[in-house]
Amino acid sequence: MFLSTLKSASQKKDLSEQINEITTELHAKIKHFSDLRSIEGKFIPRNLALVEADQFGDCKDFALIFTKILRSLGYEANIALVRIEDSPSIEKKNSKYV
């Protein structure tokens, strides 16, 4: 699934069109759900094979896939955790962005 997204994005002429293609395809392929479980106290993306298999993911998963595709296209891309409000509740007030 994600290889087809990489392929279609690589056929676009510039970064803006590639980002639009990746965003459109991932939103069509991955249904959003909030996964607030932690592993050893850390909020990490799920295994991408699982995301691809069940077609569900949260912002961590989406950001990781998006970053991997952009890197495969030759761009430098990183994930950032952004604190939206000053709150100890990570599940409601934070998000991940590429």
Image (cartoon, rainbow, N blue to C red):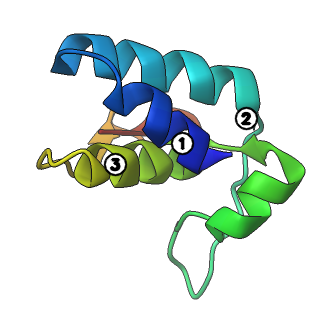
Q: Name, please, the residue furthest toward the left.
A: 76
Amino acid found under the numbered disc labelled 1: Phe
In the picture of the structure, the residue carrying the numbered disc 3 is 67
Q: Amino acid at mark 2?
A: Ile
Tell whether label 1 touches label 2 (CB within 8 Å). yes
Disc nearer the start of the sequence (2/1):
2
Q: Position of residue 66 (x, y in %)?
A: 42, 42
Residue 86 left/right relative to 25: left
What residue do we see at 63% from left, 72% from top? 38
Tell me the CA gap for discs 3 and 1.
Answer: 8 Å
> Could you tell me residue 17's position as x and y percent?
29, 11
Q: Do the residues under discs 3 and 1 have CB atoms within 8 angstroms? A: no
Count residues near mark 3 (Cα–Cα under 10 Å), then give few for <14, some for 14-19, many for 20+. some
Q: Is residue 91 left or right of residue 29?
A: left
**Residue drawn where x is 73% and y is 42% of the image:** 34
Alpha carbon distance from label 2 to label 1: 8 Å
